[in-house]
Amino acid sequence: MYRINILLMVLITLLVVPACSKSSKQGTEMKAAPDRAEASITWHNFNEGLKLASEKRKHIVMDFYADWCGWCRKMEAEVFTDPEVAKNLRDNYIAIRIYTDKNHNETIRYKNHLLTKQEFSMMLGVQGLPTVVFMDREGNLITKIPGYINKETFLPLLSYIREECYQKKVPFKDYMDGKVPCGAK
């Protein structure tokens, strides 16, 4: 009798627990789906992204990323999935992600050079993760920013680069504080 009770409890547990966890996951996914669609960014590899930037005449935002990097994951969860950030990136930029911990044999074609991702990272001076790199439409380096960037800084930064304030020598801090507008080109 004791064995039958244990067997019944194991069977009930095996049948009930997966059913409960499955229904709660479905509910979460259904609620999150509209936000994900609104906040989706198409990340390109460098070679295709550079080509698209030239064709579409858009600046490049490049995210140097690794799965093991906690700050990279935090930036993905809090900044890149924000609907306002995602829309700005989709509308005004070509988004490139360099996965530093994957596809080690992937090569990057940059300015008549064939580079590994590690060589490319070193050439740009990327020393830690995350690092966000901004390039112009031709793939020339504008700036690189190491570390986590919160949404409140990232959004004005996107406008600053899009409006090409860096070419007018407008300090970013003055731009953020509203002291110096530079106007879109």
Image: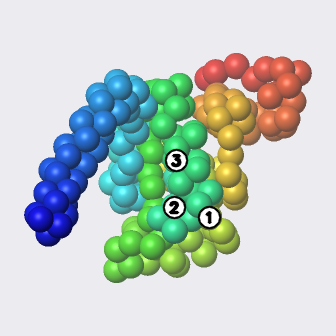
Residue 72: horizontal and vertical position, in percent? 57, 56
Element marked by disc 2? strand
Q: Where is residue 25 in the image (x, y as percent from the top left)?
A: 30, 39
Looking at the rendered structure, the kind of residue marked 2 is: Tyr
Please tell me which residue is depicted at 44% across the width and 51% down the height of the picture. Answer: 96
Distance (Cα) linking label 2 and label 3: 9 Å
Please tell me which residue is depicted at 77% across the width and 34% down the height of the picture: 168
What residue is disc 1 on?
A: 129
Of labels 2 and 3, the one closer to you: 3
The amino acid sitting under disc 1 is: Leu
At 13% from the left and 57% from the top, the residue drawn is 8
Earlier in the chain: of badge 1 and badge 3, it is 3
Disc 1/disc 3 C-alpha distance (Å): 12 Å
Q: State the image coordinates of residue 126 (x, y, percent, origin top left).
A: 64, 68
Residue 118 higher or lower than 174, as above or below:
below
In percent of width and height, residue 114 lies at: 40, 76
As helix, strand or loop, the secondary structure at mark 1 comes to loop
Q: Can you name the residue that lies furthest to the front here? A: 1
Verify CB contact (< 8 Å) between mark 2 and mark 3: yes
- Find disc 3 in the rendering and name its residue: 76
